[in-house]
């Protein structure tokens, strides 16, 4: 599990996550599936 992901409720977090995932998506020619969930505390 990556430790440097943005907090889910952080402003701009979704955009930052998309920028982080773009190289992985490109390396897989767009064939990927990302499942994002937040552990309950």
Image (cartoon, rainbow, N blue to C red):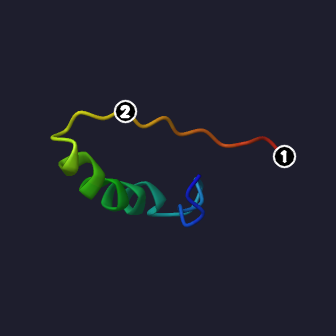
- Provide the residue designation for mark 2: 33
In this view, 24 is above or below 20: above
Mark 1 closeness class: few <14, some 14–19, many ≥20 residues within 10 Å? few
Seen as rendered, the residue at the extreme left is 29
- Select label 2 or label 1 by which is in front: 2
Percent across and percent down for residue 30 are 19, 38
Percent across and percent down for residue 1 are 59, 52
Q: Residue at x 84, y 46 (%)?
A: 41
Q: Are marks 2 and 1 in contact (CB under 8 Å)?
A: no
Mark 2 → mark 1, Cα distance in angstroms: 25 Å
Q: How many marks?
A: 2
Give left or right: position of 28 versus 18.
left
Give left or right: position of 6 versus 27.
right
Percent across and percent down for residue 40 are 78, 41
- Provide the residue designation for mark 1: 41
Which element type, helix, strand or loop, lies under badge 1?
A: loop
Q: Residue at x 41, y 57 (%)?
A: 17
Q: Residue at x 59, y 55 (%)?
A: 9
Tell me which corner region of the image, top left, top right, bottom left or bottom right, holds residue 18: bottom left
Give left or right: position of 6 versus 23.
right
Which element type, helix, strand or loop, lies under badge 2?
A: loop
Mark closer to the chain start, 2 or 1: 2
Tell me which corner region of the image, top left, top right, bottom left or bottom right, holds residue 20: bottom left
Q: Residue at x 40, y 63 (%)?
A: 16
């Amino acid at each position: 599990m990556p430790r440097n992901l943005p907090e889910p409720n952080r402003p701009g977090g979704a955009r930052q996550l998309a920028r982080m995932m773009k190289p992985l998506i490109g390396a897989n020619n767009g064939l990927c599936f990302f499942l994002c969930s937040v552990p309950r505390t």
